[in-house]
Amino acid sequence: MAISLINDYNYGAHPQVLQRLVDTNMIAEPGYGNDSFTQAATQKIRQWAHCPQAHVTFVSGGTQTNQLVIDLLLQAYEGVIATTSAHIAWHEAGAIEFTGHKVITLPEHDGKLLASDVRQYLHEFELEDTHEHMVQPGMLYITQPTELGTLYTLEELEELSALAHDFRLPLFVDGARLGYALQSPACDVTPADLARLSDVFYIGGTKMGALCGEAIVFTRPELVPRHLLTRIKQHGALLAKGRLCSVQFDALFSQMPDVYGGESQTGGVLYDQIGTHADNLAVRLHDILTAKGYRFLNESVTNQQFVIVSAHVVEQFKQVVDAGVWEHRDDGSQVLRLVTCWATRTEDIESLEEKLPSVRG
């Protein structure tokens, strides 16, 4: 049976998350996020991000989150700046445009949006005599990590943040896989840095061990849209059982002993442990593939690895690993995306050293 590395949401939920749902199941609480679990999860996230003034809101999914944040913060005539490879530009089924906001795409550099490109675009926009007839740029959108598993450095994030503030544009960081970014050995950005430099970010739960759920974090009170709950409800995103998401985040951001058998000496919040576990296995996966002669689309340093598999071994490869096809190439080769997660087992990754076909001559 093939080892499933097709994505990081193909299993249910981390056992600790499920257990918290079971343990709290018969406790009666108010609805719509007015419960004690939401208060507890909010406080834990504030502590984790070193952002005591943060306003935290829980919703059920990533597309929902992106649509909400962008629509809530933009005026009707404004669009959002992102890269050509951005998730909102490719894999949101037009959800952003559905609300009337254009996604303004700029070139990507290994998945990243560069401050220099944004600055050039904004200057050229202002110099355009007919810019009043154009969609006005109203926000910067980035993902950490990027769609290609690469990371914004602290310096790059600081440049984007300074630029955004110079032009009075909010900086929104999509964190669907944030835990895999922050726990990468190559990451020099901390949760506190993220809270300090962005205006709003979200912490992904769906891809990080929750059944569902994302936490939207407005980093300053003045950024919180008026009548936020009402507007979330207008989008069909307000859960009567608001506890569904917050109970899971309460578990994800609880301090726990090491749950992965020695990967961490001190344990830490479950969310961070999951990120460390998946990233460690992705590094081991990369090493095994490299030793067998495979090439990579890029040098991802997070839980997503993009491997180029030639036509003559691709079917054999897929018999061993259930992977997603990222790209079909003219020579018949395919770029496959292999993704580790909370449920990936060390023994499964190690078994690939023997099972995967070698491409060395």
Image: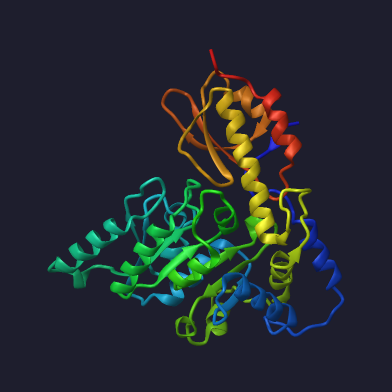
Where is the N terminus found, in terms of image quarters? top right
Q: Indicate the position of residue 74 as horizontal and vertical percent values.
A: 39, 75
- Residue at the farthest bottom position: 227
Which quadrant of the view contains residue 20? bottom right
Judge whether 74 appears above or below 80 on screen: below
Which residue is pictured at 64% across the width and 53% down the height? 275
Q: Is residue 17 left or right of residue 152?
A: right
Depth check, front residue: 182 or 40: 182
Q: Indicate the position of residue 295 as horizontal and vertical percent values.
A: 49, 28
Q: Is residue 30 left or right of residue 152?
A: right
Which residue is pictured at 40% across the width and 61% down the height? 157
Which quadrant of the view contains residue 51? bottom right
Depth check, front residue: 31 or 39: 39
Asked if residue 240 can be seen in this view, the reply is no
Q: Indicate the position of residue 300 as horizontal and vertical percent values.
A: 50, 42
Depth check, front residue: 77 or 114: 114
Q: Is residue 84 left or right of residue 119?
A: right
